[in-house]
Image (spheres, helix red, strand yellow):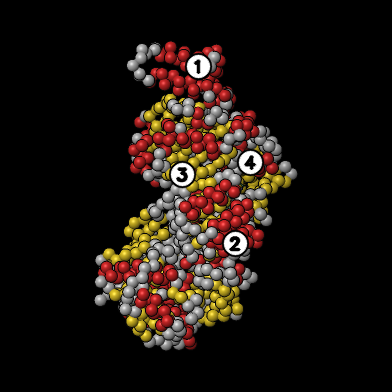
């Protein structure tokens, strides 16, 4: 029997929502094709999360309980994934398009002799072919792309599918693995976490994103306040990441992250294609910009033409009232 | 350090009207810039390699004008080069050339694939890092700051190695007149190649789903805010 | 040697590229500098390149068909009041013959294409490695020594040449810097051009405008298109888009308190126009200053020791109602300036006296001849009547003439009299008519 293998990314002890989104869709496909669905978890606490994987459709959960995976490093991750893919010999490997996955996807494909459909917005199985749609040209176009290679890897943009629970057996299978540190051509010296990320951007239901119009610390304070009132994660355009006002982890767009929350506030963001490539699929977009011709208004569900330094204090006060009455 | 940067010619994605104009992939421009900065004041080369149609020489000249040393142009006409094919061709090229560091862009601006770099590293058996936002040479070690999911990771790579570069690493220089003139006089090592078959194929290109037209509020800030909150609550149901 | 060229051309627009092509063909060593990221990046233009000089620069340019959008095969002049449009329409198969007498262009495509052709000419010349097209570089200064131009400065780089051709377009800062242009140009010598490019699938466009192959339509408008502000409108068909825009008098526009963008939106909403652009999506909006084409607006002189001014930098343009001619003038003047350089090089004399040949050549060409003979037409066109009374009257007449409403019908001459009565004094109109007859 063929199978679909889902790589699950773990952050702060939880399986990332984007991984569960991708697995939910993989589950639908697997059931339709009569294939089995298998999940992969790597890390010292991998087995603890097997139950969650089972609850989202995994028939088998392949785990490697090795602390080498606890912080991201591509060489051991590659070796681990290679071992798992070889053990499972699936038709299709599915992962969420996170930075850690992007880091190894190409190399893993070479190692496993696979074809890759990276960063897709949707995918399906059509007979011998794996077919996907992926944004190209800074998301101005969608390219329908396919592969008939015997083994195909697909990475999925966050927000492309809903998370759906589905009962799988969730049988835990330990995959034998030993990593030889001597083969490591690189060492991790340090991890610099950026301060202030309370909510993971790509998982957030509400995102408040700031652009050059937010200008300085006083503007940032207004944005922070709006985020805390609405329980939002904070995003940013490249312009304000470059100036250091916001951390690079907050960058949304072609170079940064892809988000598709229910509610997206674009504050003082012009709406360059490289930015909108990362947020155009948000359900409701609110744009605040003093330039009535800013391209962001073409995407906005609600556009407010005006100075964010005037609008945000009023908006924050108003929203506080509404939220308090809940 | 001896650098070689893999550069690609891509359509100008920023243009509002598709004019057919081709440019140097912005991520590759950042890679060239970074290599030039690291090698400043040394005699170490920053070489280039590009796979693409004959008309891509214009893009090679642009990168040479920034100050790169020598370039190889592997001429492959036609469509259908996916990252897999590119990595295979580049790997063959590097069999015959020794470098301390190979740089690529973190992704192609037109396809956003982001695969060729790590595929090439794997084929060459080199340690690598992706999505670099900073590079520094320390003896024969390359110190890379990479942007990860939750923060930045600082890695030390033994050379030879490969790094894929983000445009967040620097702002590439605009070539000066002298550079443009010098670039024109440089020989480009041009060779015809036959690419291997791609593993993925684009069948059609579609328009992305459109958004419902929204409403634009103008006027007094207080009125706009009241109207927005009302609509977010009653109409959009997102509060 | 490296730093000394026969000629440095400032500006990679049409004038500059035409000069460059001419120099490349004559094996001269030159440097062309364009501040845009590529030739055409910064250029706005309504889009018809008139005349046949293009075939001189790039023989058989229609064969590869890459540079231009469509050739002009169908022309229309429309008078409009707020509800109606009355057109004079001309279509003829004689337009099918090459060389075409007009082609629509999108500058970002056309200029880049022409620059590619110039590069090919350089590669085929005697000094393929000694002439350059350099983009993304702003020339900040034309260097002067003892009253003669000797080169240019861009940032901290300096380059010398026997002469400089300034082809910088209508915002002619360098022309002013070398002392040929008045410190500032009066508002009545410049207008504001606004333009949108609206995308429409080629098949629909061809069906809608009855086009065949690469044939295209040009439509000029007078009257309600400019909401009473002095000016006119245009609509041109490209391969898979429409260029639509207005040219508006600077002073009038300022006095009206309206923005060009608002007026353009009113124009686009006019029933006759809305039907032509239906479902087309705006992909580009741009605004640019354009000369009014008044010969009095020309710089005090267009040459000096070691320097010549070509194209719209010299305010060479004609807008006499039936067409805007700026690009063809830029092309011809660029060619003539370069030919002057070639002669000067032979004589090794780049003095003012020698370069006066440029002026002479331009005077005997159609460029300055037409600018002189249509001088009055340009003035006439700027009269208030031309963009209010006349179009209103024409449309009023049209409404009567073409309406068949089961009432006794008047003779056309009576209709005309009635229309005139409603819109103008008969006497004023006769005066205007006489003026028009003399000036056109
Ligand atoms: C290869 C490449 C990749 C890129 N990747 C990304 C990416 O991932 N993410 C990204 O964001 N960008 C990216 N960019 C950069 C992108 O092109 C834009 O430069 C960037 O998004 C602009 O950010 P901005 O909208 O904040 O700034 P600007 O474009 O400068 O816009 C600022 C806006 O704020 C408005 N404003 C100013 N003051 C106020 C005020 N007081 N109140 C209200 N509004 C105000 C202005 O009207 C303006 O519209 C990339 C570029 C390249 C070349
Ligand atoms: C809305 C509109 C519609 C028009 N429609 C038509 C039409 O239908 N037909 C027609 O024939 N004409 C038309 N024109 C006029 C026509 O566009 C101009 O007359 C023509 O472009 C002039 O060509 P040029 O080469 O002299 O200048 P430009 O085309 O303006 O080129 C000047 C070039 O010089 C560069 N430059 C300027 N300064 C520097 C510097 N310091 N350093 C380096 N580079 C520099 C600029 O970037 C530019 O590329 C229209 C104009 C407008 C605004
Ligand atoms: N045709 C090519 N020639 C040279 N390098 C290329 C080519 N295509 C891709 N690359 C390199 O691979 C990077 C992007 O990989 P990808 O996104 O997989 O296409 C680019 O930034 C280049 O450095």
Disc 3 and disc 4 in contact, CB within 8 angstroms: no
- Find residue B22 and name its label: none
Is disc 3 surrounded by few (<14), some (14 to 19) or many (20+) residues within 10 Å? some
Give the mark nearer the N terminus: 3 vs 4. Answer: 4
Residue that mark 3 sits on: C282
Mark 2–mark 3 Cα distance, whole angstroms, equals 37 Å
Residue that mark 1 sits on: C422
- Mark 2 CB in 8 Å range of ligand 1? no
Disc 1 and disc 3 in contact, CB within 8 angstroms: no
Closer to viewer: mark 3 or mark 4: 3
Closer to viewer: mark 4 or mark 1: 1
Badge 4 sits on which subunit? C
- Seen from the viewer's position, the closer of residues C403 and A303 is A303
Give the mark nearer the N terminus: 4 vs 1. Answer: 4
Residue that mark 2 sits on: A225
Badge 2 sits on which subunit? A
- Seen from the viewer's position, the closer of residues B133 and C272 is C272
Residue that mark 4 sits on: C172
Horizontal side of residue C66 vs C342, given as left or right: left
Please name the residue shown 59% across and 71% down the image. A195
Label 3: element kind: strand
Label 1: element kind: helix
Closer to viewer: mark 2 or mark 1: 2
Badge 1 sits on which subunit? C
Q: Quadrant of residue C240?
A: top left
Mark 3–mark 4 Cα distance, whole angstroms, equals 30 Å
């Amino acid at each position: 029997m063929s199978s679909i293998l889902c790589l699950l990314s773990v952050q702060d002890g939880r399986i990332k929502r984007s991984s569960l989104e991708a697995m939910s869709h993989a589950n639908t496909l697997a059931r339709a094709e009569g294939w089995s669905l298998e999940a992969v978890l790597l890390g010292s606490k991998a087995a603890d999360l097997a139950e969650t994987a089972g609850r989202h459709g995994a028939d088998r959960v392949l785990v490697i309980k090795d602390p080498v995976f606890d912080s991201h490093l591509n060489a051991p991750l590659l070796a681990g994934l290679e071992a798992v893919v070889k053990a499972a010999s699936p038709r299709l490997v599915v992962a969420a398009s996170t930075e850690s996955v992007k880091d190894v996807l190409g190399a893993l494909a070479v190692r496993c002799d696979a074809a890759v459909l990276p960063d897709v917005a949707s995918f399906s199985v059509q007979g011998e072919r794996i077919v996907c749609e992926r944004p190209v040209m800074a998301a101005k176009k969608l390219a329908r792309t396919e592969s008939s290679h015997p083994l195909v890897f697909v990475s999925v943009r966050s927000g492309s599918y809903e998370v759906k629970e589905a009962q799988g057996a969730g049988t835990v299978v330990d995959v034998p693995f030993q990593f030889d540190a001597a083969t490591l051509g690189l060492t991790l010296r340090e991890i610099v976490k950026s301060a202030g990320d309370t909510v993971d951007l790509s998982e957030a239901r509400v995102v408040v994103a700031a652009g050059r119009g937010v200008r300085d610390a006083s503007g940032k304070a207004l944005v922070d306040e709006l985020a805390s009132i609405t329980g939002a994660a904070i995003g940013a355009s490249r312009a304000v990441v470059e100036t250091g006002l916001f951390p690079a982890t907050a960058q949304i767009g072609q170079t940064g992250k892809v988000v598709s929350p229910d509610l997206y506030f674009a504050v003082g963001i012009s709406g360059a294609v490289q930015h909108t490539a990362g947020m155009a699929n948000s359900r409701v977009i609110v744009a605040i910009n003093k330039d009535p011709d800013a391209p962001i208004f073409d995407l906005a569900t609600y556009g407010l033409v005006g100075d964010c330094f005037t609008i945000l204090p009023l908006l924050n006060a108003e929203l506080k009232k509404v939220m308090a009455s809940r | 350090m001896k650098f070689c940067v893999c550069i690609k010619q891509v359509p100008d994605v920023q243009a509002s009207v598709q004019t057919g104009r081709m440019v140097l992939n912005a991520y590759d421009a950042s890679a060239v810039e970074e290599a030039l900065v690291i090698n400043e004041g040394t005699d170490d080369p920053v070489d280039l390699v590009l796979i693409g149609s004959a008309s891509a020489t214009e893009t090679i000249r642009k990168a040479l004008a920034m100050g790169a040393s020598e370039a190889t142009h592997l001429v492959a006409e036609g469509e259908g080069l996916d990252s897999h094919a590119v990595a295979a061709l580049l790997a063959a090229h590097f069999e015959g050339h020794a470098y301390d560091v190979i740089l690529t862009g973190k992704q192609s601006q037109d396809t956003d694939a982001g695969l060729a770099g790590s595929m090439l590293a794997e084929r060459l058996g080199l340690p690598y890092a992706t999505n670099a936002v900073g590079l520094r040479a320390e003896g024969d070690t390359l110190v890379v700051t990479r942007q990860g999911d939750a923060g930045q990771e600082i890695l030390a790579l033994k050379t030879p190695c490969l790094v894929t570069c983000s445009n967040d690493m620097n702002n590439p220089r605009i070539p000066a007149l002298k550079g443009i003139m010098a670039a024109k006089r440089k020989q480009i090592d041009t060779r015809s190649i036959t690419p291997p078959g791609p593993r993925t194929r684009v069948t059609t290109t579609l328009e992305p789903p459109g958004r419902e037209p929204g409403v634009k509020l103008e006027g007094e800030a207080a009125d706009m805010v009241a109207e927005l909150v009302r609509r977010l609550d009653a109409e959009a149901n997102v509060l | 040697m490296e730093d000394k060229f026969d000629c440095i051309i400032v500006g990679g627009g049409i004038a500059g590229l035409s000069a460059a092509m001419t120099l490349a063909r004559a094996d001269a060593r030159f440097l062309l500098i364009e501040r845009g990221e590529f030739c055409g990046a910064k250029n706005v233009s309504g889009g018809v390149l008139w005349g046949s000089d293009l075939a001189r620069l790039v023989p058989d340019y229609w064969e590869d068909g890459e540079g231009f959008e469509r050739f002009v095969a169908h022309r229309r002049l429309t008078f409009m009041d707020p509800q109606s449009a009355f057109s004079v329409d001309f279509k003829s198969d004689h337009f099918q013959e090459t060389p075409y007498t007009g082609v629509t262009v999108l500058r970002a495509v056309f200029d880049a294409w022409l620059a590619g052709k110039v590069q090919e000419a350089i590669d085929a010349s005697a000094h393929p490695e000694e002439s350059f097209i350099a983009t993304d570089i702003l020339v900040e200064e034309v260097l002067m020594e003892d009253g003669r131009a000797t080169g240019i400065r861009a940032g901290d780089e300096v380059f010398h040449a026997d002469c400089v051709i300034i082809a910088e377009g209508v915002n002619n800062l360098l022309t002013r810097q070398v002392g040929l242009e008045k410190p500032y140009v009066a508002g009545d010598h410049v207008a504001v051009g606004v333009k949108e490019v609206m995308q429409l699938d080629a098949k629909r466009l061809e069906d809608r405008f009855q086009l065949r192959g690469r044939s295209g339509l040009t439509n000029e408008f007078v009257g309600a298109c400019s909401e009473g502000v002095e000016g006119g409108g245009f609509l041109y068909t490209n391969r898979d888009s429409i260029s639509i825009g207005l040219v508006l008098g600077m002073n009038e526009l300022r006095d009206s308190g309206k923005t060009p963008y608002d007026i353009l939106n009113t124009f686009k909403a006019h029933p006759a126009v809305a039907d032509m652009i239906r479902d087309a999506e705006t992909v580009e909006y741009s605004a640019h200053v354009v000369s009014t084409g008044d010969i009095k607006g020309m710089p005090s002189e267009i040459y000096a020791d070691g320097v010549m001014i070509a194209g719209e930098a010299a305010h060479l343009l004609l807008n006499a109602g039936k067409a805007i001619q700026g690009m063809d003038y830029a092309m011809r003047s660029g060619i003539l300036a370069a030919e002057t350089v070639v002669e000067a090089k032979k004589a090794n004399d780049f003095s003012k006296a020698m370069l006066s040949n440029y002026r002479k050549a331009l005077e005997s060409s159609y460029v300055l001849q037409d600018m002189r003979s249509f001088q009055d037409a340009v003035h006439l066109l700027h009269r208030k009547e031309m963009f209010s009374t006349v179009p209103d009257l024409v449309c009023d007449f049209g409404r009567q003439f073409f309406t068949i409403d089961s009432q006794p019908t008047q003779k056309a001459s009576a209709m005309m009299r009635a229309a005139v009565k409603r819109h103008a004094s008969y006497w004023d109109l006769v005066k205007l008519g006489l003026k028009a007859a003399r000036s056109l």
